Image (cartoon, grey):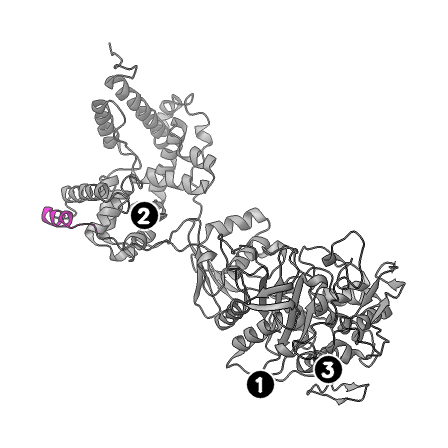
Amino acid sequence: MAKKRAGGGRSKTQQAAKFLGVSVLAGAVLAGIALPAAGALGLAAKTSVEGFDDIPANLRTPPLSQRTTILDSGGGEIASVYSRDRTVVPLKDMSRYVQQAIVAIEDARFYSHGAIDVKGILRAVNQNAQSGGVSQGASTLTQQYVKNVFIEEAGDDPDKVAQATQQTLGRKVKELKYAIKLEDKLGKRKILQNYLNITFFGEQAYGVESAAQRYFSKHAKDLTLEESALLAGIVQSPTRYDPVNHPQAATARRNTVLRRMADLKNITRAEADAAAARPIKLKISRPQNGCITATDGAGFFCDYVREVLLNDKTFGATREIRSQRWMQGGLTIRTTLDRQSQKAIQASLSKHVYEDDPVAAAGAVVEPGTGKILGMGQSRPYGFGTNQTQINLSVNRKMGGGAGYQPGSTFKPIIAAAALEQGISPYQQYSSPFKMAYPRPVQTCTNEWNGTDTVQNEDPKEVGPYAMKEATAKSVNTYYVQLISDMGVCPAVTMAKKMGIQPADGKSLKQVPSMALGIQEMSPLTMAAAYATFANEGTYCSPVAIESITDAQGKALNVPRTSCRSAMSKKTADTVNALLKGVVEDGTGKQAGLKGRDSAGKTGTTDSRYAAWFVGYTPNAAGAVWVGDPRHQRQMYDITIGGVAHDKVYGADTPGPIWRDMMAGALDGRPAPALPTVPLDDPKGNGDDGNKGKDKPQQKPKPQPGDGDNKPGGGWHIPGFPDFLGGGNGGW
């Protein structure tokens, strides 16, 4: 009678009996599958393997997760991202040594047995009986491949991974059934190829190609004999035989593989001895994973591309499907990012605003007529450290951005466009006093607004009457409040929607007269795309970041395309061009003007200096720059930004120069077409500026007085709300 060993364990005979019982049961199941006449034998296992007949006959093999490569518009790599660092290659692109080595050490009889190796099972039973434990397994390469498929399908879910690797009879039998079908369906070479592509080699490397790159910085097809033996040896225990952290154990395991290859006549004994005598020589390539590896500040653009794939239904009906597609990887994504523009954006932001400044800056540039995002960046780098962030300050919250920032007077050109479309003349004059109550009532899309607050200009000397051109150049608040009150709020809301303007939090625009002063939070990308409408003869094109995508098999996938629509007539757009050229030539935006090419734009600063902006364009690029505290807490008074001290910050003196430098760099060496404009006479007798902008210069020394819309503590204010929600540029 068998006796228990000391300590209560089973005897060697009992251990062997247990292993043999499992093997016999598996054999019984095999007989039931392969030989219908022996079906009764398979039924003997039914109580232990319930629902065996319900196991699908064919293994569902999910596509292997691989790295995704994100490219700029010229084909240069921005970043590689992956959940599993894997590159799938065919067997012909794997060294014959690595093929022989993995078979030799993992399943020497691979080419001679079926899905189940009966001799291997018997050998394992004998070995385990002698050792008193389970010192040797009997899984074939095919069975190991099936198990790896289960693990791959489980992804990063720890519960699913545990289920995929649990040591139960039910899982083992399921593995056996799939292995039998795969042997018949795929054949040995295809199974070996799949195995070498799916298995884990440690150090974050999945598949032999990534392993070759990780340990030796070469392709799998170029692996030498000793390198192949080293990789094959790792598979049994990637941690124990890790050559980086455990070189002695890895060397001993490599030499075991070499001896086994010699025993099987894959190589000669002399070749094995020579290879074993050579020390391990690694040439490590550390994994470069994720948007954090992008250069020139392109990490935020990289992250935006990921958000596009996760949010756009072009890539799947549900977010779960889209997320699975991203995790699966294997994509080559060619984007719209222009490397010259990206470098210029980041260089200008870094020059004018330091990463440890009390405020931050962000900028985005798009191409009029195509909606292509040419670049985006910010002063605080992409990352997890001090003065770093992963919040993309250039985009809406849904796409990885923040809450947005009040654009101030950069919203006035939208009001001007709406008024011109309503037939209001650019020569329309308003009294434009220094300070006034909001006119009321004001018609909205659904009812009337009846507020009782006041608004004032930045400078007490700014007193009308003004027409639209001078009021825009000087950014006169009271003019624009009278203008929107005269035409009604609804045309302004309609125009903003046509120009793709939506608050950064995704909510609807608030229908209040103070919208003329930019009181609703926007993102730089939204404002850049909106201004591109003026450069594109009144046609708005939605911003896009992706040119094309191919999957791991080289198949082209559908990608979201820009959507273009007419927002205003060409005459209206040309008129706004004339208004905004005046801003950069003789108005508040002179410090943002470009040399040698036509440009137009508008400054903006919010109440209490929580944010400052410049948004502008040329015929071939439109850009927006924001400076402020992302938390909406730091007011920009008595502040040093980029080493320059400011009593108070204006849209002209900080965002303006950032815009100028980034656009100059982005457009360097590129065509400089003229902006189409209409001639506008100055009602005060200063002449026709046509394309020359001969507005009377402001009688104030540099720095320019900013936007004329931000007297601290003044303007429209709602009691009980902070200034950045009230005041001249605040409110609802």
* Residue appearing at x 61%, y 64% in the figure: 639
Compared with residue 570, is residue 563 higher up or lower down, i.e. above or below? Answer: above
Quadrant of the image for the C terminus? bottom right
Residue 406 position by quadrant: bottom right
The residue indicated by pointer 3 is 699
Any part of residue 367 in sight: no
Q: Is residue 445 left or right of residue 306?
A: right
The residue indicated by pointer 1 is 596
Q: CA distance from mark 1 to mark 2?
A: 59 Å
Residue 486 horizontal/vertical position (percent)? 86, 70
* Label annotation for residue 196: 2
Q: Is residue 172 left or right of residue 688?
A: left
Q: Is residue 586 left or right of residue 229?
A: right
Q: Identify the secondary structure beneath mark 3.
A: loop
Kindly report which numbered mark, 1 or 2, lies closer to the viewer in this rendering: 1
Compared with residue 119, is residue 201 higher up or lower down, i.e. above or below? Answer: below
Residue 615 within the segment the image draws in magenta: no
Residue 495 position by quadrant: bottom right
Which amino acid type is shown beneath numbered disc 2? Leu
Compared with residue 45, is residue 409 higher up or lower down, i.e. above or below? Answer: below
Any part of residue 440 in sight: yes
Q: Identify the secondary structure beneath mark 1.
A: loop
Which segment did they paint magenta? Answer: 269-280
Mark 2: give few (<14), some (14-19) or many (20+) Cα within 10 Å: many
